[in-house]
Image: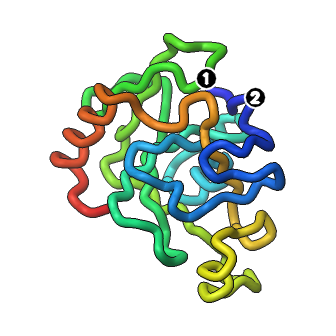
């Protein structure tokens, strides 16, 4: 799976041309492209795929009112009976199937680095976190920003079996 070529610089879903994002964009079922290093650092045994980014699906049910981490499911093209199916993460391959939920525990995406100079108060005042304040790069999937209704039902079913938090 490659990163969406149109993911740079759009103003859809709260992202600005400078690559900033809004905390409340991480709605349940929202789709993301997270930096490969994030997945390597977060998933034990995960090897570098050679890609710059890999897809993630939010299973966050709470509103983002602070700089808390957001639970993301890792996306892969490898079918797994435990995972749920999502089609068309990129416009270029609308029928390509990806699977989310292969790992039964979502990976917590951190909003900011402990070494960052941004405070939670600054975040609440400005509603954005710049690239310099984040330990990993993440971008909204602009080709497919959120699951469709059928996929949303599958994600809800997955959560009821494997993940009741969020």
Which quadrant: the C terminus? bottom left
Residue 120, located in which quarter of the rendered image?
bottom right
Lower position in the chain sequence, tag 1 or tag 2: 2
* Residue at left offset 81%, top offset 49%: 17
Q: Residue at x 43, y 46 (%)?
A: 73
Horizontal and vertical percent position of residue 27: 43, 53
Q: Any mark on residue 3, and which?
A: none
- The residue sitting at 69% across, 32% down in the picture is 3
Task: Give the position of the N terminus as an image quadrant.
Answer: top right
- Separation of disc 1 and disc 2 at Cα? 8 Å
In the picture, measured across the screen, residue 12 lies left or right of residue 101, that is: right
Q: Residue 102: name its quadrant.
A: top left
Q: Pointer 2: residues within 10 angstroms few (<14), some, or many (20+)? A: few
User: Mark 1 near mark 2, Cβ–Cβ under 8 Å?
Assistant: yes
Q: Nearer the viewer, residue 48 or 36?
A: 36
Note whether 159 is above or below 146 in the view shown.
below
6 shown above or below 54: above
| Marker disc for residue 5 | 2
Residue 36 position, x and y percent, is: 66, 46
Q: Is residue 69 above or below residue 93?
A: below
Residue behind mark 1:
90
SS for dot 1: loop
């Amino acid at each position: 799976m490659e990163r969406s070529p149109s993911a740079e610089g759009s103003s859809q879903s709260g992202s600005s041309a400078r690559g900033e994002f809004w905390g409340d964009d991480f709605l349940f079922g929202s789709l993301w492209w997270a930096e490969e290093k994030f997945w390597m650092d977060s998933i034990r045994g995960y090897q570098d795929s050679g890609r710059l980014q890999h897809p993630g699906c939010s299973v966050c049910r709470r509103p983002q009112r602070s700089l808390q981490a957001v639970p993301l499911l890792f996306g892969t093209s490898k079918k797994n009976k435990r995972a749920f199916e999502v089609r068309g993460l990129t416009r270029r391959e609308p029928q390509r199937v990806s699977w989310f939920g292969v790992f039964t525990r979502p990976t917590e995406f951190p909003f900011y680095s402990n070494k960052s100079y941004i405070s939670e108060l600054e975040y609440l005042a400005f509603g954005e976190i710049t690239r310099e304040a984040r330990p990993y790069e993440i971008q909204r999937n602009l080709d497919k920003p959120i699951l469709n209704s059928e996929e949303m039902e599958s994600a809800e079913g997955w959560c009821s079996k494997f993940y009741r938090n969020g």
